[in-house]
Each structure stands twice: as structure tokens, then as C-alpha cells.
């Protein structure tokens, strides 16, 4: 392993997180529109979920089609704990994290005995089970009628009731999540996950516990999704099981594929591009004579996913990393030496 390259990557990501925090602080003052700020709140929430998926998919090499379930677990935990039992919203967030960890452990142990597409089908089935649970247990979740009356998020007596205050909250959580993921990726655990992604047999041969490492990645990604779900519930104050169906998991997967699962920034980049394309489709689709229903969006993003998997499987941020490496001083020296030899 190139230690210098490893260190450069870690420091580069830290600089990126610092720049992101600075941009987050000044953005609302440059763009005072509540609609744009609310759109970036949604991007931030998606970015939190997808950052967890980057750890699971891009570094551990495990595909999940059930992350909407963890998203829903966080949302309903906060809604029930704070809205029905009148506990502080933070207690609801912590409850969601605890339940997500337990469920991830219970689901991960049998699921990780499977490989390739069988693992994806297992996580898909888990998502369907949670969706059915949320839909049918009407006395607790409200069923398809939804859960109303979720209080705004509150910490130390301060309520995040405005879009601007909630925007700062969401992006602060995202920045912390990126910092945590960056430290994880560049730690011993992160190196173990990378080796599993490369070859499970080789990783096991050097003493890496495959089950333990995979479970760590799943639990961490589940926590990311649960926290995002909790914040989402407190932001919109109403949730419905249909917000957490299987299609939502596929949307998260599309975001990660667009951005690039191998890059720390792939999840956030994919979330930005996805939301931006959705907004563009709302304006362009009627011009083509189609309705603005979700069916056209499913077709569009389905085609986009296939095209990306064929021509850009590393994602947009993965391509950027390749260009960055191509023009790095070390790469240039190697190319100069090859040119001189010729």
C-alpha cells in the first residue's frame, strides 16, 4: 500500500469537508429562497444516507436494496417516541439508532452468508418486510393514513422550526458523517473492508474476519440511514409508509452509482445530481407531451442507471479521481520516464 497516497487522500478529504462547511455557512445568505434551501435540505438528507451506502457498497463491496427500511425505522422511531410518547426528539433519534443497529445485526448475520445477487435479494426482502410492518401495524404507525403531529427537532431548548435553521442542522450532521466516514475508510477497519471488496478469499487468508467486518459496515450504514430518516420526519412533520418502500432503496442505489461508490464524495455528488435532474424533469417532461408522474422518472433513471453501469461503472467522482491521479506529479514523472525510454 502506498502510505503517501493514503495520507494524501485522507488530508484531501479533510480539506474538502472544511470547504464544504464554509460553503454551507455562506450559501443561505447568497440564496435566500426558501424553496432552494428546502431543496438542499433534501439533498443533505439523501447525502447522509448515501454516505453510509458508500461505506457499505464502495468499500465493503456489499449491495443493499433495503436501506429505505433503515430510513423508515429512524423516521418512525422519532415520530412515535416524540409524537406519541412526548419524549424529546433527540431520544427518538437515539431510539432509531439503537433499533437500526439491532435490526442490522439480526439481518446481517444470515444475509452475509449469501453472496452476489442472493445478498441483494435478501436485503430486498428485508425492505419489503419492514414496509409491510409499517403499513399494517396501524395502531402504532397509522398505516397508510400516515403519522401526524411530529414535533420539530429540538436540542437544548432550541427548536429547528425554520428552513434555514434545519438546513444548518442537516448539513452539520452530513459534514460530521463525512468526517467520520473519512476516518473509518482510512483506518484499519477501512483497509480490511477494502481488502474484502477486492477478494474475500485473500482477505480471509490474512486473518480478516469477514462476518465481523461486513457487520460493522452494515451497522454503520444503517445508523446513517436511521439518523437521516429521523431528521426527515421532524422536518416534514408527517410520514407515510409509502415514503419508505422498495423504490426508495433503489433511488438511493441510483444516487450512489451516479456519484461513484468508491469515493467518499460519491454519495453527496449523486444526491445533488439526482435532485437536480428530478427538478429539471418537472420542467422538461410536460414539454415532451408526457405527464409529470413518477412513472416517467422511473424510466428515465432506469435507463440512466444502465448507461452508467455500462460506460461509467466507477461513477462521476470515480472518473474525477482517475483524472486527478493521471495529472498528479508522481504519474507525470512515470510518464516522462517512459517517454525518455522510448
Image (spheres, helix red, strand yellow):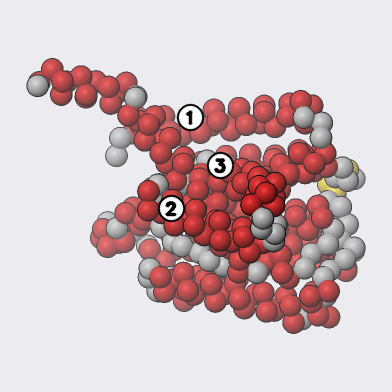
Residue 332 place in picture, x, y as percent: 27, 22
Q: Sequence-wise, which precedes: disc 3 or disc 1?
A: 1
Quarter occupied by the N terminus: top left
Residue at the image position 46 percent from the left and 41 percent from the top: 316
- Where residue 5 appears, as percent x and y from the top left, is 36, 32
Of residue 90 and residue 241, the one placed in the foreground of this image is 241
Quick one: label 3 or label 2, which is nearer the N terminus?
A: 3
* Residues tagged 2 and 1 counted as in contact (Cβ below 8 A): no
Q: Residue at x 41, y 66 (%)?
A: 211
Is residue 55 left or right of 227 when viewed as pictured? left
Cβ atoms at labels 3 and 2 below 8 Å apart: no
**Residue 269 bears which disc, if any?**
3
167, above or below 254, in the image: above
The 10 Å Cα crowd at callout 2, few under 14, some 14 to 19, many 20 or more, is few
Task: Examine the image and state in which quarter residue 331 appears.
Answer: top left
Residue contact between numbered discs 3 and 1, judged by CB atoms under 8 Å = no
Q: Tell me the distance, in whole angstroms, between the alpha carbons under discs 3 and 1.
A: 16 Å
Q: Nearer the viewer, residue 308 or 227?
A: 308
Q: Which mark is on residue 307?
A: 2
Q: Say which element carries label 1.
A: helix
Looking at the image, is 234 positioned above or below residue 17?
below
- Give x and y (percent) for residue 126: 57, 74
- Label disc, if present, on residue 12 of the rendered structure: 1
How many residues crowd around disc 3 within 10 Å: few (fewer than 14), some, or many (20 or more)? many
Nearer the camera: disc 2 or disc 1: 2
Amino acid at each position: 500500500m502506498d502510505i503517501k497516497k493514503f495520507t494524501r487522500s485522507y488530508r484531501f478529504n479533510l480539506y474538502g469537508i472544511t470547504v464544504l462547511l464554509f460553503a454551507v455557512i455562506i450559501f443561505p445568505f447568497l440564496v435566500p429562497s426558501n424553496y432552494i434551501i428546502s431543496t438542499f435540505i433534501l439533498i443533505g438528507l439523501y447525502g447522509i444516507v448515501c454516505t453510509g451506502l458508500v461505506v457499505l457498497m464502495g468499500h465493503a463491496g456489499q449491495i443493499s436494496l433495503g436501506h429505505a427500511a433503515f430510513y423508515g425505522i429512524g423516521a418512525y422511531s422519532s415520530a412515535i417516541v416524540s409524537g406519541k410518547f412526548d419524549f424529546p426528539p433527540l431520544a427518538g433519534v437515539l431510539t432509531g439508532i439503537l433499533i437500526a443497529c439491532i435490526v442490522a445485526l439480526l439481518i446481517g448475520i444470515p444475509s452475509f452468508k449469501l453472496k452476489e445477487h442472493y445478498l441483494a435479494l435478501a436485503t430486498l426482502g428485508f425492505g419489503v418486510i419492514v414496509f409491510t410492518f409499517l403499513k399494517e401495524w396501524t395502531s402504532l404507525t397509522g398505516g397508510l393514513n400516515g403519522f401526524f403531529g411530529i414535533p420539530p427537532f429540538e436540542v437544548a431548548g432550541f427548536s429547528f422550526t425554520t428552513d434555514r435553521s434545519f438546513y444548518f442542522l442537516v448539513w452539520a450532521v452530513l459534514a460530521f458523517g463525512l468526517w467520520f466516514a473519512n476516518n473509518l475508510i482510512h483506518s484499519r477497519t477501512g483497509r480490511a473492508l477494502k481488502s474484502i471488496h477486492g477478494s474475500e478469499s485473500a482477505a480471509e487468508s490474512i486473518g480478516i474476519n469477514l462476518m465481523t467486518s461486513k457487520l460493522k459496515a452494515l451497522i454503520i450504514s444503517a445508523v446513517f440511514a436511521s439518523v437521516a430518516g429521523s431528521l426527515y420526519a421532524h422536518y416534514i412533520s408527517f410520514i407515510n409508509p409509502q415514503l419508505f418502500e422498495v423504490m426508495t432503496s433503489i433511488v438511493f442505489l441510483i444516487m450512489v452509482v451516479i456519484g461513484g461508490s468508491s469515493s467518499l464524495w460519491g454519495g453527496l455528488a449523486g444526491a445533488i445530481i439526482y435532485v437536480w435532474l428530478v427538478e429539471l424533469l418537472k420542467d422538461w417532461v410536460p414539454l415532451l407531451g408526457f405527464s409529470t408522474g413518477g412513472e416517467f422518472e422511473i424510466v428515465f433513471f432506469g435507463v440512466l442507471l444502465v448507461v452508467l453501469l455500462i460506460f461509467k461503472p466507477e461513477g462521476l467522482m470515480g472518473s474525477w479521481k482517475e483524472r486527478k491521479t493521471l495529472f498528479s506529479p508522481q504519474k507525470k514523472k512515470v510518464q516522462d520516464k517512459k517517454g525518455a525510454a522510448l
